[in-house]
Image (cartoon, grey):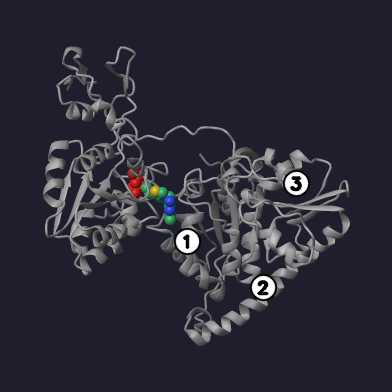
């Protein structure tokens, strides 16, 4: 729950602090598409009635709605995970040309260590490429203040400003003092074709204006208090940003620091000033050598970080080895295998696909877990929407017995144009939309096909069946995947028919509707110890020491998939509720 109790100390995550900062800065419009580690920013902002918040259908749409609101005169915010910024890249790359009018802040939450993403790109490079200022807070309290500064900078220099967090800052909690919201009057909007219509000549002129702006921003970054020299022992100096500031300070409390909070345009003079004052200079950063390359270009000698440290999350205990020029030694932990929940409606689909021996092009969501053994029946996952586009490529390359799968939220995000492409280019075959009525992977956010907004209010519900038909699907079957036999029969029928077919496998995510039916009975005398029931990878079933099967009563939802797959009748449906 948000609080508007001014002066109150609240324990906020970095994401909540970003939202709080935006709220206090008078933000009027906020747009996002969910994604770890950025999701909570919009969930928090949506609780303030003053903020027109939305889950947009994807990040490109979110970016354009927020940017245009700012151009129209309302302070606006866009937030997404790092790869979400890729989806918004087209408008982002021209946004610095058109400028903003009212303040526009772009929050990118990067995921070093790939805790929950498809890659670990470093979006500091994107800020540089898009030629927009880059602010990098090191903690939640800083995140709140940096967002407020970002709105001011955005208006002062007429540019989008990126605030970049990483998972560790987005999800760490810190005491933050709540401030008062400043109501910012709407800025006047004037039609300005030369500024807002990016045809070649106008864009060329705007590029000239942008380069001039960057020089002014660089001069500003040199003096900005966000770039701070902390002089201690002059023997050892560190140039740091983001989370590396906290980690290095913990490991080398007596060293001197140049803490860069405003790291693009790069404050070259400040860096030179710091380098002159310390004997040995190190640059400690996470992922790409973004600061290091800038500093080298100034002719300043810094010890190269071993490239092994470009991979994965920075950890405090790595820092002495970075200083010594050593390679990274990977931590020796074993990750727990992720698994679909007991009763998950995706599980029967992968069971059926496994039996079909199809090659399955997959996408991103809880259902990507279908790739893991023992289900092992999802064979690609690149980015959102690629479950359908890869289907098209693999149909061309591999011929029949290819199936494409995609989640409902992902279908709305990026699957619709891909389905149109299939139909337009006369591709036949089967796509399965795994419709669990939510964006489960990122914590059950609503999307257009749920008919609910981010504020929890009802809205028009997008009909996936109608969309699929309108996109050109010849057959659209809606099936409850818990009816395994029916699902299997329809998959068999559609898989290599001379038609473009979509099966909408529709049953709610168990975390949304935790209905519990009776736990199946186990009949020991019928069990032949074939363990087919274990091959559905349900966490509620396990093998006991005597080689038989048990079901954890407290975990089982009574979905009865184990009953369906048991060939000997050892697992029997329990009609009790
Ligand atoms: C470009 C991009 N945006 C956002 C995400 C975060 N993300 C991963 S999967 C997913 C959607 C999952 O929902 P759905 O497709 O309905 O599948 P479910 O998890 O419900 O099975 C999201 C938002 C991402 N990985 N990439």
**Which numbered disc, 1 or 2, marks the residue closer to the eye?**
1
Please provide percent x and percent y for residue 283.
73, 53
Q: Are the residues at dot 3 and dot 2 in contact (C-beta closer than 8 Å)?
A: no
Q: Is residue 487 above or below residue 393?
A: above
Relative to the observer, which residue lies in front, 161 or 359? Answer: 359
Residue at the extreme bottom: 201
Q: Please report whichever mark, 1 or 2, sits nearer to the chain's N-terminal start.
A: 1
Which quadrant of the view contains residue 113? top right
Residue 27 visible in the shown view? yes
- Which of 273/336 is in front? 336
Residue at figure coordinates x 66%, y 69% from the top left? 156
Q: Residues within 10 Å of mark 1 (few under 14, many from 20)?
A: some
Residue 446 is at least partly visible in this image: no
Residue 152 drawn at (x, y percent): 65, 63
SS of the residue under disc 2 = helix
Look at the picture and state if 520 lies above or below 170: above
Tell me residue 63's x, y (percent).
47, 63
Q: Is the CB–ligand 1 distance for label 1 below 8 Å? A: yes
Residue 214, numbered circle: 2
Q: Residues within 10 Å of mark 3 (few under 14, many from 20)?
A: some
Mark closer to the chain start, 1 or 3: 1
Labels 3, 2: front one: 3
> Disc number at residue 323?
3
- Closer to the camera in the image, 67 or 250: 250
Q: Which residue is mark 1?
A: 86
Q: CA distance from mark 1 to mark 3?
A: 33 Å
Left or right for 182, reference 565: right
Dot placed on the residue nearer the N-terminal end, 3 or 2: 2
**Foreground mark, 1 or 3?**
3
Question: Residue 17: percent from the left, percent from the top?
Answer: 59, 46
């Amino acid at each position: 729950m948000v609080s508007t109790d001014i002066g109150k100390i609240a324990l906020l995550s970095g994401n909540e602090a970003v939202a709080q900062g935006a709220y206090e800065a008078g933000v009027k419009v906020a747009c996002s598409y969910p994604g770890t580690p950025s999701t909570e920013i919009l969930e928090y902002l949506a609780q303030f009635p003053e903020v027109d918040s939305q889950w947009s259908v994807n990040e490109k749409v979110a970016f354009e709605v927020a940017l245009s609101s700012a151009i129209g005169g309302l302070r606006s915010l866009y937030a997404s995970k790092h790869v979400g910024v890729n989806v918004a890249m087209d408008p982002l790359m021209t946004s610095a040309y058109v400028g903003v009018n009212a303040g526009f802040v772009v929050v990118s939450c990067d995921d070093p260590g790939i805790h929950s993403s498809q890659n670990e790109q470093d979006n500091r490079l994107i800020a540089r490429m898009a030629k927009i200022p880059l602010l990098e807070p090191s903690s939640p309290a800083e995140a709140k203040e940096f967002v407020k500064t970002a709105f001011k900078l955005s208006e002062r220099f007429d540019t989008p400003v990126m605030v970049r967090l990483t998972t560790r800052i987005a999800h760490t909690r810190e005491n933050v003092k709540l401030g008062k919201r400043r109501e910012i009057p709407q800025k006047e909007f004037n039609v300005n074709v030369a500024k807002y219509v990016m045809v070649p000549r106008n864009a060329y002129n705007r590029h000239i204006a942008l380069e001039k702006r960057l020089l002014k921003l660089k001069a500003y970054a040199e003096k900005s208090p966000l770039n701070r020299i902390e002089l201690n022992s002059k023997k050892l100096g560190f140039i740091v940003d983001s989370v590396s500031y906290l980690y290095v300070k913990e490991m080398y409390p007596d060293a001197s620091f140049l803490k860069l909070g405003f790291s693009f345009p790069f404050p070259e003079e400040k860096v030179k000033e710091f380098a002159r004052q310390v004997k040995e200079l190190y640059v400690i950063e996470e992922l790409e050598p973004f600061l290091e390359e800038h500093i080298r270009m100034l002719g300043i000698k810094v010890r190269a970080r071993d490239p092994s440290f470009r991979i994965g999350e920075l950890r405090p205990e790595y820092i002495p080895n970075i200083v010594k020029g050593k390679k990274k030694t990977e931590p020796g932990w074993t990750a727990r295998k992720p698994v679909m929940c007991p009763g998950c409606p995706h599980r029967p689909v992968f069971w059926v696909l496994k039996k079909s021996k199809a090659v399955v092009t997959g996408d991103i969501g809880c259902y990507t877990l279908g790739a893991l053994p023992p289900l092992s029946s999802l064979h690609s996952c690149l980015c959102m929407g690629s479950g359908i586009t890869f289907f098209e490529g693999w149909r061309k390359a591999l011929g029949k017995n290819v199936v494409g799968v995609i989640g409902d939220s992902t279908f709305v995000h990026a699957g619709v144009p891909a389905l149109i492409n299939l139909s337009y280019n006369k591709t036949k075959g089967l796509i399965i939309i795994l419709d669990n009525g939510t964006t489960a992977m990122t914590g059950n956010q609503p999307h257009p096909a749920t008919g609910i907004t981010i504020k929890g209010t009802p809205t028009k519900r997008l009909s996936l069946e109608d969309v699929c038909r309108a996109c050109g699907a010849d057959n659209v079957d809606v099936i409850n995947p818990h009816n395994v036999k029916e699902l299997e029969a329809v998959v068999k029928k559609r898989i290599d028919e001379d038609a473009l077919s979509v099966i909408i496998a529709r049953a709610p995510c168990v975390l949304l509707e935790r209905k519990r039916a009776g736990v199946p009975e186990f009949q020991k005398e019928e069990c032949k110890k074939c363990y087919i029931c274990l091959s559905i990878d349900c966490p509620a079933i396990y093998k006991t020491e005597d080689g038989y099967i048990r079901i954890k009563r407290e975990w089982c939802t009574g979905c009865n998939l184990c009953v369906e797959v048991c060939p000997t009748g050892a697992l029997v449906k329990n009609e009790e509720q």
